[in-house]
Amino acid sequence: MSSQQPSSSPSADLLTLCQTDAFTPLPPATLHALFSSPPFVPVPDTFNTRDLGLLPGSPVRPGLVYRSGGFFQGLSPQGAAAIRDGLGVKKVVDLRSVREHARQPDPAIDGVEGVWVEPAEEDAVVALGEFVEGEGEKGYVAMYLDVLRVYRGGIRAVLEHVRDGGEGAGLLFHCTAGRDRTGVMAGLLLSLAGASKETMVLDFMLSRPGIEPVKEQLLAFALHGSMAASPDAPGFHNLVNLRISSWKAFVEAVEAEYGGFEKYVTGTLGFSEGDVATIRRNLVKQPE
């Protein structure tokens, strides 16, 4: 009988990688292998671009819903073609703030509808002091509940597209890092589709390696947005590190505040139960 211990699952290995500290560089060979494998999809001029349907354990149909970071270097004809023709995207929803959108609007892509709905506030404020305790759970809960409140219009646009577009109308949504606002949107869709808690956690945590190609820019963005005096400021380390505990705390807060993601969609966004059933039907893979 072999004395070897069973190896961990691919998802477990991925989750371990995703818990690497934000200030620790990830090996280029590791990143190349990761970005060449599902759920990541290669699109020039983008980063952290993933197919929600290719996430391990995802109930979402592949080729329908994509998430990404912003187009930091602009979008070349090759990048535009990859989004439109390679991924089959019909609509891009921008989940950024007034200031972010005004500074660098999404480029027009022939044959793809671009949507940006002005948020309820010009910019949601990050209170760095709320990230000091523990692993920053209090800060993440406040920040992500703000996403559900401030970016209702963009979230509604994503859900309307899934409801009305049927099975073949590809959608991409993004913010700046493709991490927080995009992560909340992805978690909401996965929840509606009936994904397990483990699958939702993995999707959330995959933004840790996903942002590595532009990490220095994003750390500077976080430093400016949080008004931290330096990366050593109390709470900043928790702000820039994704933790499983922070996602779980947010999901519990959504349950307490709204009664869960589905109740947020019906009670706050005004979708009917029939709308939710259609959204779920359009999202979920059909049995073979």
Image (cartoon, rainbow, N blue to C red):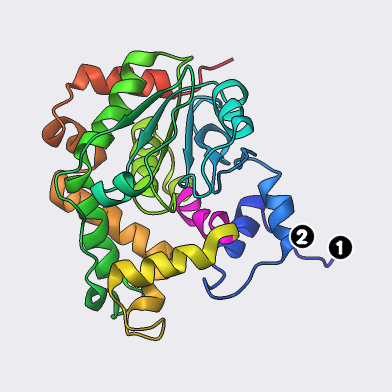
* Image height of 284 relative to 71, above or below: above
What residue did someone put label 1 on? Answer: 2
Could you tell me residue 23's position as x and y percent?
A: 54, 75
Q: Can the viewer see residue 224?
A: yes
Coordinates of residue 75 in the picture (x, y in percent) = 54, 38
User: Quick one: label 1, few (<14), some, or many (20+) residues within 10 Å?
Assistant: few
Q: Residue at x 12, y 34 (%)?
A: 267
Label 2: state its secondary structure.
helix
Front-most of residues 205 and 111: 111
Q: Which residues are magenta?
A: 201-212
Q: Secondary structure at mark 1?
A: loop
Is the N terminus in the top left, top right, bottom left or bottom right quadrant? bottom right
Is 22 in front, or is 174? Answer: 174
Q: Which residue is painted at 13% across and 36% down in the image?
A: 268
209 drawn magenta: yes
Work out how far the residue at label 2 is from the one at label 1, CA to CA, in angstroms.
31 Å
